[in-house]
Amino acid sequence: MLDKYLKKWVLAALRPLAHLFLRLGFTPDWLTLMGLVMNLGATAAFAKGFLHWGALIMMVAGLCDILDGQVAREGRKETKFGALLDSTTDRYSEIFIYFGIGAYLIGRDEWVVSGILFFAITGSLMVSYVRARAEGLGEDCKVGFMQRPERLSALALGSLVGHQGLVFVLVLLAVTTNYTVIERLAHIRNRLKSGPNQPTPVQQS
C-alpha cells in the first residue's frame, strides 16, 4: 500500500538527490551495501536499548534503500545482479533489525513479547517467501498490507514512541504479517485455479 500511494511522490522528491549521488560517483550497489551497514548500526542501537537512535538509523538506511533503485534508473545502471543484491540485503537487514530488538527484549526479561517477536519474524519472512515463490510460478503477488516498507516504517515509528510503542507494533506485525501470508496464498490459489491447467514442477527449498 505504501508503494501504491506514495512511491511516485517519493521518487519524484528524491530525484534531485539521486542526481547528486550520480555526480558524486555513487553506484547503486554501493548505496545498497551502505544501507545494509546502517541497518547493522540500527541493530546495535536496538540491542543496547537505544530505541530512538535505532529508529532514526533505520530511516536513513531506508533512504539508501530507495535511492539505490532511483540511482540505478536515473543513471541507466539497472542490472539483474543489482536487483538480486538489493533483495538479498533487504532480507538480511530486516533479520538483523529483529535480532537487535530480540536482544533488547531478552535483556529486559520480556519473554512473552519475545514470543510475539518470533511470530512477527516468521510472518515477515513468509510474506516475502510467498511472493517470491508465486513469482517463480509466473504469478504476480503484491496483495496484502504488511509488505517490507510498511513493516519497517511501523517498527521505526513504534520505536520512536518508546518501549510500549514497539510492543504494540510487534503485536500488530505478528497478526498482520501472518494474515497477509494467508491472503496471498488465497490470492494465488484463485489465480492458479482460474488460469490454464498446466502441471507445475515441484521444487524443494
Image: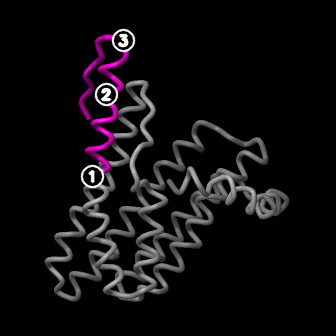
Question: Which quadrant is home to the C terminus?
Answer: top left
Q: Residue at x 70, y 56 (%)?
A: 11
First in sequence: mark 3 or mark 1? 1
Q: Is residue 158 left or right of residue 176?
A: right
First in sequence: mark 2 or mark 1? 1
Q: Residue at x 71, y 54 (%)?
A: 27
Q: Is residue 130 left or right of residue 21?
A: left
- Give the residue type that dot 2 points to: Asn
Residue 72 - label: none
Single out the mark in the foreground, 2 or 3. Answer: 2
Query: How far across and how far down the image is residue 44, in percent?
Result: 41, 79
In terms of secondary structure, where does tag 1 sit? helix
Read off the residue under disc 2: 190
Read off the residue under disc 3: 196
Query: How far across and how far down the image is residue 65, in percent?
Result: 58, 59
Disc 3 and disc 1: Cα gap in Å?
Answer: 27 Å
What span is colored magenta in the figure? 180-205
Q: Residue at x 20, y 69 (%)?
A: 116
In terms of secondary structure, where does tag 2 sit? helix
Query: How far across and how far down the image is residue 127, in percent?
Result: 34, 48
Read off the residue under disc 1: 179
Give the color scheme: rainbow, by chain, secondary structure or one colour.
one colour
Q: Nearer the viewer, residue 39 or 156?
A: 156
First in sequence: mark 2 or mark 3? 2
- Give the residue type that dot 3 points to: Pro
In terms of secondary structure, where does tag 3 sit? loop
Quarter holding residue 141: top left
* Residue 186 belongs to magenta span: yes
Q: Nearer the viewer, residue 137 or 44?
A: 137
Q: Residue at x 25, y 81 (%)?
A: 105
**Above/below status of 182 relative to 153:** above
Q: Is residue 88 left or right of residue 98?
A: right
